[in-house]
Image: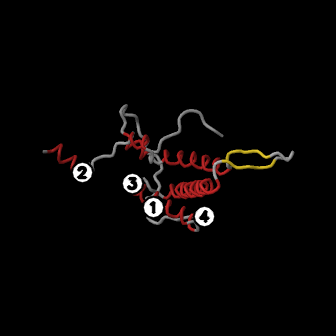
Amino acid sequence: MATTGRKPKPRRLKELDGDPKSRFLSKNEPMPPVSENVIEWDAVKNNPVAHRAFMDNVRILRAMKMLTDAEIPLINIMAICQARIEEAENQVESEGMISDYVNTKGERNSVAHPAVGVSMKYAQMLKCLCIEFGMTPSSRGRLEVPNEDEKDDFASRLRSKIG
């Protein structure tokens, strides 16, 4: 059942986004453990294109510090989408954008190749998943990564207050 309003944004994305209105961030939000061992589905393991896409997505999300055990199924789905887009585009490339078929009356008709629709469907799914992870230029542009130089631990804050 669908809910109304905006989709909730993950806490990590809220933190990177910055909070100009100083809204309260839930302290009770569940935080899955950071994943060290990634588990590929069989559909990804057996497809070299999907495997390459999976490993690329894992590398990118690790660098963004956004990879946890909860994201692994979505990364598998992203990899499958990327592989199916490439497969559909290769089919369109070899067979052309227009496909001919004979209808029930025996007339020959020209229509768009079915692989074009498949490619568009998976591209839309991939785009939605990329937005969820902050992997598109516009979603990444809204993020503000904190400086790694600044030590923001309790001891350094305490030292700055004391002396």
Q: Which residue is mark 2?
A: 151
Q: Which residue is mark 3?
A: 65
Left or right: 89 as drawn, with respect to 9: right
Q: Residue at x 68, y 45 (%)?
A: 112
Q: Which residue is mark 1?
A: 35
Q: Which residue is mark 4?
A: 43
Number of the front mark, 2 or 3: 3
Is tag 1's residue or tag 3's residue first in the polypeptide sequence? Answer: 1
Q: Amino acid at mark 1?
A: Ser
On screen, residue 76 above or below 136: below
Element type at mark 1: loop
The residues bearing labels 4 and 2 have C-alpha atoms spaced at a distance of 43 Å
Is tag 2's residue or tag 1's residue first in the polypeptide sequence? Answer: 1
Q: Please state the horizontal and vertical placement of residue 7, each as a whole percent of the image.
A: 53, 39
Q: Answer whether labels 2 and 1 touch (C-beta < 8 Å).
A: no
Left or right: 41 as drawn, with respect to 152: right
The residues bearing labels 2 and 3 have C-alpha atoms spaced at a distance of 17 Å
Q: Please state the horizontal and vertical placement of residue 109, each as a whole percent of the image.
A: 76, 45
Q: Residue at x 47, y 55 (%)?
A: 32
Query: Total number of numbered labels?
Result: 4
Element type at mark 4: helix
**Badge 4: how crowded within 10 Å, few (<14), some, or many (20+)?**
some
Q: Amino acid at mark 3?
A: Lys
**Badge 2: how crowded within 10 Å, few (<14), some, or many (20+)?**
few
Is tag 1's residue or tag 4's residue first in the polypeptide sequence? Answer: 1
Number of the front mark, 3 or 4: 4
Q: Which of the pair 136/62 is nearer the observer?
A: 136
On screen, residue 32 above or below 29: below
How is the protein colored in the picture? secondary structure
Q: Amino acid at mark 4?
A: Ala
Q: Please state the horizontal and vertical placement of residue 75, each as a whole percent of the image.
A: 52, 56
The residues bearing labels 1 and 4 have C-alpha atoms spaced at a distance of 20 Å
